[in-house]
Amino acid sequence: MSHAVTCTAPVNIAVIKYWGKRDEELILPINSSLSGTLSQDQLHARTSVMARADFASDAIWLNGKQESIENPRLQNCLREIRKLAAAKQTHQQGAPLPTDKVHICSVNNFPTAAGLASSAAGYACLVYALAQLYKVGDSLAEVTKLARVGSGSACRSIYGGWVRWVMGEAADGSDSIAEQVVDEHHWPEIEVLILVVSDHKKTTSSTAGMQTTVETSSLVKHRADKVVPQRMEDIQNAIRARDFETFGRITMQDSNQFHAVCLDTYPPITYLNDVSRGIIDMLTKYNAHKGKIQVRAFSWQVS
Amino acid sequence: MSHAVTCTAPVNIAVIKYWGKRDEELILPINSSLSGTLSQDQLHARTSVMARADFASDAIWLNGKQESIENPRLQNCLREIRKLAAAKQTHQQGAPLPTDKVHICSVNNFPTAAGLASSAAGYACLVYALAQLYKVGDSLAEVTKLARVGSGSACRSIYGGWVRWVMGEAADGSDSIAEQVVDEHHWPEIEVLILVVSDHKKTTSSTAGMQTTVETSSLVKHRADKVVPQRMEDIQNAIRARDFETFGRITMQDSNQFHAVCLDTYPPITYLNDVSRGIIDMLTKYNAHKGKIQVRAFSWQVS
C-alpha cells in the first residue's frame, strides 16, 4: 500500500527580521520576528511525499536533483513527525507506519538561496505534507513547531496574512511558535514588488552568518533585547490599524538594522550591493518628494 | 605693521571612530576616539594667516578660492582666539591687536571632503597658526580645545603619533581635549596605505550624518556607552605593546561598527560602495590565508 500527499506552501518576507539563534539544534531565535506571507500565485514551493513499506530507504529530490537525505534539519523533521506518529499510531486510519520509508520531491518555482525564503517555503511545505501523510499535527501551532526545526522562518509560512514568530522562553522550544496576527483579507491593498538584484547563491548562508553575528557583534544583543520587542509591538499595531506610514518606516528601519548588525559582524557580512543601495536611495528620495512613505524599501536576505 | 604666520598640519585617521555629538555648538562628542597622525610628507594642510590694522575685514581663501568668512565654525575659532588674546593683551609683544582684521589662505594637497580628514587638518592648521599669530594657547591641550570648536577631529591633528580625544564630561567642553598616547617614534613599522575609491565629495557630510544618526539610530547610544569605552582601553594597550593582531582586529571592528550605525540611521547613510567592500573582502581572505592579521582594512570616512 502506498500513501501520497502533495502540498504547496508560500514564501514569507520578514519585516521584523529574525537574525541569531539561542539554540542551534532546536532553532530557537534570540528575538521574535514578523512577516507577511505572499500569495502563492507567483511564488511557491510544491512538495510531494510518498511512503511505502517496500521503499529501500528515505530519499529526497530537490528541483529534480537527488540530494542527501542525511541533511540534519531534514532528519530533525522526519524524526519529530515519526515520533508523533508512533505515539498516536492506534488512531491513524489510512496513515503509513512510522517505519515505512518516504520519498520526497520538492520544487521551488523561483531561485534557491537567493534570499527569497526558499528554505522557509520548502520546509513549511515538507512538514505540512508529512503531517498530512502521517496524520499528525493536530493544531497549526504544532505544525509551526515542526516546521521551525527544519528552518526557523519556515514556521511563519504555515499561515497566510501577517504572522509573528514568538521567540518563546522554554529551553525545549515548546513555546517558540508562529501565530497569525491578521489573515490575508485584512489589508488587501498591500502589494509586494520583488526586485531580483542578483540570482546568485548568497556567499554567506543565513545559518553561518547569524552564528558569526551572535558570536562577534557587540550590537546584536542590544537589538534583540531592547529594540525588537518595541518594534514588534509597534508594527503589529500599525498592521491592525492599516497605518502604512508607520508600517513602512519600521519595516525599512528593521531591514537597515539587520544589515547593520551583519556589518558589525567580524569579519563583516554584506548582503547589499551598489544596486540594492541605489534602490534604497531612490525610494528614500521618492518618499521625501511625496512627503510621506508611499513605497517601502526592504531587502532580500530574509529569515 | 603686519603680522604673518605660516604652518602646516597633518591628517589623522581614526581607528576608534568619532560619530555623534552631545553638543552641536561646542562640538562635544558622545564617545571618545583615537587616531593615528600621518606623516606630513605626503598629505597636509598649509595655512598662512596675516593680521593688519588696515585690512577692511576678515577674509579666507581655500585652495585659491575666496570663501565666506561667515562659516559659523570659522567664526567660533576666530572669536575664541581673539577672546584669549584680549584677555592677555598686555603680555603680547609683537602680536596683532584682537581688533585687527585677519586674512587666511589655506590649501590642502589632497582632495577635500572625500573622507581624508581635510577639515581636521584644515582647522588644526588654522587654529595653530592663529594661536602663534596672537601668541595665545599656552599649552597644546588648550590649542586642541580651540581646534575642536572648528572641527571635532581637528583636535587630534595637533599631535603626532597616536592621539586620543577624551570626550570629557563638562558642559562647557573644558575637559574635551586631545592627548598624545605615544609619540610618532613609538611604532615606526606602521605604514598606512590609502586607497582612494572615489574622490567625489561625500553625499552626506559628517556633520549632517552624525546628527541624523544620533536622532534616529537605536544602536548608536549602546555603541557610545558600552562598546567604545572598552575598545578605547584595549586599543591603547595594543598600541603601547605594539600588538598588531589586537590593534588590527579592533580597528576593523570599529570601522565596521561605524558603518553599521550609519546604516542603522533613518534614512540610511552609506559611505561604502562595492569597491570598498571588495577591498574589505580581499583583506579578510588575505588575513585568513596568512592565519593572522597582516594588513588591516579600514575606511575613509574618518572623523
Image (cartoon, coloured by chain):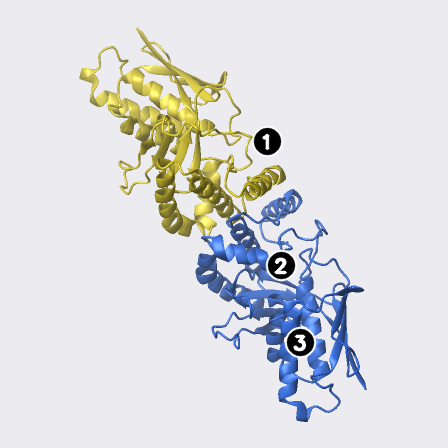
Chain colours: A blue, B yellow
Please name the amino acid that badge 3 sits on: Leu
Please name the amino acid that badge 2 sits on: Val
Q: Residue furthest top?
A: B1
**Label 3 chain ID:** A
The x and y percentages for residue B137 are 27, 23
- Residue at the disc numbered 2: A302
- Residue at the image position 65 percent from the left and 72 percent from the top: A75
Q: CA distance from mark 1 to mark 2?
A: 31 Å
- Residue at the disc numbered 1: B198
* Mark seen at residue A78: 3
Q: CA distance from mark 3 to mark 2?
A: 25 Å
Nearer to us: label 3 or label 2 = 3
- Residue at the image position 54 percent from the left and 64 percent from the top: A235
Nearer to us: label 3 or label 1 = 3
Rendered position, A207 above or below B284: below
**Label 1 chain ID:** B
- Using a 10 Å C-alpha cutoff, classify the residue at mark 2 as few (fewer than 14 neighbours), some (14 to 19) or many (20 or more): many
**Tags 3 and 1 touching, CB below 8 Å:** no
Please name the amino acid that badge 1 sits on: Ser
Residue B60 relative to residue A266: left or right: left
Q: Circle 3 sits in a helix, a strand or a loop, which is it?
A: helix
Residue B188 relative to residue A113: left or right: left
- Using a 10 Å C-alpha cutoff, classify the residue at mark 1 as few (fewer than 14 neighbours), some (14 to 19) or many (20 or more): some
Q: Residue furthest left?
A: B90
The x and y percentages for residue A165 are 56, 69
Q: Circle 2 sits in a helix, a strand or a loop, which is it?
A: loop
- Residue at the image position 33 percent from the left and 31 percent from the top: B182
Q: Circle 1 sits in a helix, a strand or a loop, which is it?
A: loop
The x and y percentages for residue A66 are 78, 65
